[in-house]
Amino acid sequence: MTRLNAAELRDISESDADDISFNIQRKPLYFILENIYDTYNIGGIFRLADALAVSKIYLCGEMETPPNHKIKKASVGTYKIVPWEYKPSAIEAIEELRKCYPVILSEAKNPEKHGSFSRQLRRDQDDKKNIKIIAIEQSKDSIPYTQAEYSMPLALVLGNETYGVTPKTLKAVDQIVEIPMWGVNKSLNVIVSGAIVAYHAANRIQDQ
């Protein structure tokens, strides 16, 4: 697969981006973003999602969406590569994944747009796999992220930079994991948190 640098990604046309995205072998991995206020964080998560070949990003609640110019800048064009959808709430994204997974593209506006995504969903349907949904959050119910059991398909929920994942959403997930903090700062940047857990999960699943 051809690798593109930041300048090439920023300048890529929508049609060329569609062609590239069509041929990416995507993992059955999803990001659910809830009330992420910082547009640069949203763009950065698109870059992370592209690096991991994430199947889809759900942008939920009070947050900007592409083509916001700051998201475009921070994502270095990957917002054109990674499939995404806006939902009014994270709960709606979770319900869709639980109810419709793995046949999500049947209700999409352009079901033919992301070929490898569609192929992966069909394979998961054949295997009759259920999706596991994990929130990354500090909570009395959380466990260290290194102690969780990960399996694909998998959705990771990332919350607001100040208030985290909402209590209602935490009740809807299968598990809550957190990253140890040994200094004075209470939490990590949302992109960093997502990267740590997502890469750990992907590596653990690959080794199984």
Image (spheres, rainbow, N blue to C red):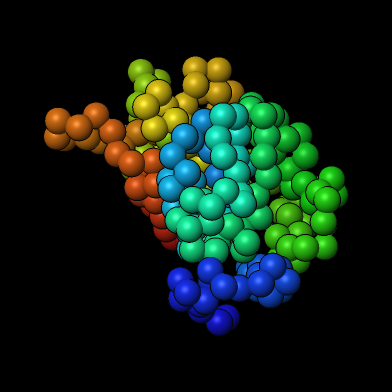
Q: Going 49% across and 21% down the picture, which residue do you hit? A: 166
Q: Quadrant of residue 137?
A: top left
User: How many numbered circles does the render carry?
Assistant: 0
Is residue 197 at all visible to an observer of this figure?
no
Based on the displayed image, in which of its 4 quarters is residue 14 positioned? bottom right
Q: Between residues 145 and 48, which one lies in front from this camera angle?
A: 48
Among the 4 quarters of the image, the one containing residue 88: top right
Q: Position of residue 133 (x, y in %)?
A: 56, 36
Q: Is residue 100 left or right of residue 4?
A: right
Q: Is residue 88 left or right of residue 156?
A: right
Q: Is residue 83 left or right of residue 158?
A: right
Residue found at the very far front of the displayed protein: 69
6 or 144, which lies in front? Answer: 6
Residue 118 image offset from top left, x and y in percent? 76, 59
Position of residue 87 measured from the top left corner of the image (x, y, whole percent): 68, 34
Of residues 84 and 146, the one nearer the viewer is 84
Please report the residue visible at 44 percent of the width from the left and 30 percent of the height from the top.
160
Q: Is residue 179 above or below residue 119?
A: above
For the view shown, which residue lies furthest in the bottom direction? 2
In the picture, the quarter occupied by the N terminus is bottom right
Q: Position of residue 83 (x, y in %)?
A: 66, 55
In the displayed structure, would residue 6 be above or below residue 138?
below
Q: Is residue 120 above or below residue 45?
A: below
Residue occupying the point 82% across, 56% down: 110
In this view of the protein, can residue 79 be seen by the observer?
yes
Choose between 153 and 114: the one closer to the eye.
114
The residue at the point 28 percent across, 33 percent down is 187
